[in-house]
Image (cartoon, rainbow, N blue to C red):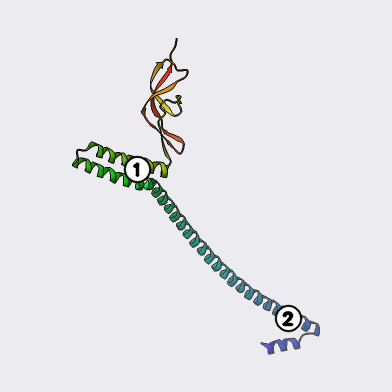
Amino acid sequence: MSRRKNKKRGNMSEEEKKEEMMAEETQASEDAKGAEEAVAEDDGKAALEAKVKDLEAEIADLKDQMLRSAAEMENYKKRLRQEKENAVKYANESIIRDLLDPLDNFSRAIEAAEKTQDVETIKTGVSMVESQLKSILSTNWGLEQFSPDGEDFDPSQMEACMVKEEEGLDKEKVLQVFMKGYKLHGKVLRSAKVVVGKPKRN
């Protein structure tokens, strides 16, 4: 091929030879440029594929983290529900524990009553259990018993079960207490049920 080109060039003028050489150089340059572009394109594809793989791995990792976080949140919610249920279920555990001893003592008092005819002994035993029970409820739980006999009638703490007109009264007074009242940390838990005397009308 080169011999043919050389023979052909031998028949050409110098100007034609230069033009042909320039054309060949241009073609070679374009070929080289095309090869470089092809290599660059292949490199670009490889880099793009690598980037896609990295992104896919990152997405998979994020998805795994989200699934784990969702599972942890669900477990946390389950624990909260269980703790709430237990708090409600065992809310009275402490007071029940405090009442076990008086309950046992009531049982002993009943057993003792079955073995004796001594009313005073039975009464003493029951009174002791009552005192123990009141002490526990007052000291440990803030329960206060009140009996407003002879006091001014206070509808916020008392319930009038009966009303009588009485001479010598200038205001409503408690004449008798049917049922004692109770307060829990100062708040009325149960009103005292009373008989109320009111001034007699002339």
Q: In the rendered image, which residue does mark 2 sit on?
A: 25
In front of the other: 86 or 74: 86
Could you tell me which quadrant the C terminus lies in?
top left
Q: In the rendered image, which residue does mark 1 sit on?
A: 132
- Residue 133 appears left or right of 115: right
Residue 89 is at least partly visible in this image: no
- Residue 19 appears left or right of 94: right
Residue 115 is at least partly visible in this image: yes
In percent of width and height, residue 24 lies at: 72, 81
Residue lying at the far top of the rendered structure: 202
Could you tell me which quadrant the N terminus lies in?
bottom right
Residue 32 occupies which quadrant of the picture?
bottom right
Q: CA distance from mark 1 to mark 2?
A: 117 Å
Q: What residue is rendered at 25% in x and 45% in y?
A: 108
Whether 190 is drawn above or below 24: the answer is above
Helix, strand or loop status at disc 1: helix
Please report contact status of discs 1 and 2: CB closer than 8 Å, yes or no: no
- The amino acid marked with disc number 2 is Glu
Q: What residue is rendered at 43% in x and 22% in y?
A: 173
- Crowding around mark 2 (Cα neighbors within 10 Å: few <14, some 14 to 19, many 20+) is few
Q: What residue is rendered at 28% in x and 39% in y?
A: 124
In percent of width and height, residue 28 lies at: 70, 80
Q: Earlier in the sequence, mark 1 or mark 2?
A: 2
In percent of width and height, residue 11 lies at: 76, 87
In percent of width and height, residue 154 lies at: 46, 26
Whether 3 is drawn above or below 92: the answer is below
